[in-house]
Image (spheres, grey):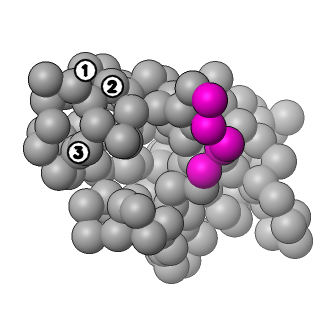
Amino acid sequence: QVQLVESGGGLVQPGGSLRLSCIASGSGANNLYRMGWHRQAPGRQREPVAGILRDGTAGYADSVKGRFTISRDNAKNAVYLEMNGLKPEDTAVYYCNAGHSGEPIPRYSGQGTQVTVSS
């Protein structure tokens, strides 16, 4: 079983930046195929934000393209989300997710970290 622990959330002013980190541990943590982030704001549906494969291939939601950058460190079983140009509509709980090859939906999800963008 893989455990995911996020960190790096907080309160930031519009236009500011934050860097989220997620570390995977447990059995299977060292061969995760896909890692990524999704978010959920109060009263809204869960929204995929970005994902990255083990070989570094990355994809982004249209709402964050050009502002967010996802990266991973396979040696550390870690995934990161660099968020720049933050907007109030980016306010949400951000969850790390991960899965093994062949899984259509990432099996694992973290407990979430709050990101609040407000002046």
Give the CA separation, mark 1 to mark 3: 11 Å
Q: Is residue 91 magenta?
A: no
Q: Nearer the viewer, residue 40 or 74?
A: 40
**Circle 3 — which element?**
loop
Expressed as whole percent of the image width and height from the top left, the position of residue 100 reads 79, 60
User: In the picture provided, is 71 more to the left or to the right than 48?
Assistant: left
- State the residue at coordinates (20%, 51%): 84
Q: Amino acid at mark 2?
A: Thr
User: In the picture provided, is 15 more to the left or to the right than 90?
Assistant: left
Which residue corresponds to mark 3?
86
Q: Nearer the viewer, residue 41 or 49?
A: 41
Q: Which residues are magenta?
A: 43-47
At label 2, counting other C-alpha atoms closer than 10 Å, the crowd grade (few under 14, some 14-19, many 20 or more) is many
Expressed as whole percent of the image width and height from the top left, the position of residue 74 reads 52, 57
Of the numbered discs 3 and 2, the one sitting upstream in the chain is: 3
Count of residue discs: 3
Q: Amino acid at mark 1?
A: Leu
At label 1, counting other C-alpha atoms closer than 10 Å, the crowd grade (few under 14, some 14-19, many 20 or more) is some
Residue 11: which numbered mark, if any? 1
Q: Is residue 45 magenta?
A: yes
**Circle 1 — which element?**
strand
**Circle 2 — which element?**
strand
User: In the picture provided, is 12 more to the left or to the right than 20?
Assistant: left
Quadrant for the C terminus, please: top left
Residue 116: which numbered mark, if any? 2
- State the residue at coordinates (40%, 62%): 63
- State the residue at coordinates (35%, 69%): 65
Q: Is residue 5 above or below residue 73?
A: above
